[in-house]
Amino acid sequence: MKKIIALVWVLALLVSCGTARKVQKTQQEVRIDSTATTKETNVKTDKFVDTTRTQHGKVTITEIEFYPPTPGIAVDTTGAADSSKPERASKPLPGNPANVNLQDVGNIKGAVKSIKQTVIESDVEEKGENKESSESKETESAANVGRNETNVQQSQEPTPTLTDGDTSFTYH
């Protein structure tokens, strides 16, 4: 009995080596690639404007004081000499008419006692400043998604064996 079992076992071993086997391999691979890009731009602008106002002013006050008219001296209003009256000395005396030329006023005739000029100048400055601010923000986004699927199927047939005197292939 041991011989029969050993023989069956050897026979089973030989039969298993000779059986046709078909090997299949299936592989599925999925790749997903994604890229995201974000571009952000911030712009801040400040403007300063000087709004200072200035005023310049000048006022001239002229005070002219005259002598009171003296009796016996005629004031020539026409500019012509009075030939009926005798002339006095050529030196101006108080109360005698004289010609005075003042800048910005003109020519003044008369018995001038005093002239007083007062000049008032003013400079007014109002300081001011305006500020303008602006801010802007821009965002730009882009996304790309790619999917790559790969299916691999492999089949392997058993290697053909030649039998004696046979030129064709047969599978065991």
Image: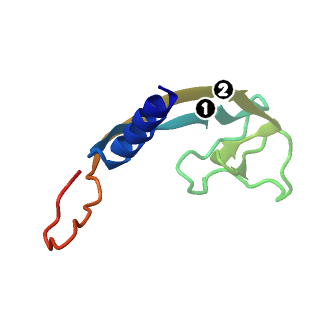
Task: Report which residue position mark 1 lands on.
Answer: 51
Residue in the foreground of this view, choosing between 105 and 92: 105
Instruction: Identify the residue shown where x is 84% and y is 56%.
Output: 89
Q: Is residue 82 above or below residue 34?
A: below
Q: How many marks?
A: 2
Residue positioned 66% across, 45% down in the render: 108
Question: Which residue is at 82% across, 59% downward?
Answer: 90
Q: Amino acid at mark 2?
A: Gly
Query: Residue 13: x, y in percent?
Result: 42, 41
The answer for how far apart the CA atoms under marks 1 and 2 are is 5 Å
Quick check: 77 left or right of 14? Answer: right
Query: Amino acid type of disc 1?
Result: Thr
Badge 1: residue crowd in 10 Å (few <14, some 14–19, many ≥20): few
**Are discs 1 and 2 less than 8 Å apart at CB?**
yes
Q: Nearer the viewer, residue 81 or 59?
A: 59
The residue beneath circle 2 is 128
Query: Dot 2: few (<14), some (14–19), or many (≥20) neighbours within 10 Å?
Result: few
Give the side of residue 10 with respect to residue 145, left or right.
right
Where residue 114 appears, x then y in whole percent?
A: 84, 36
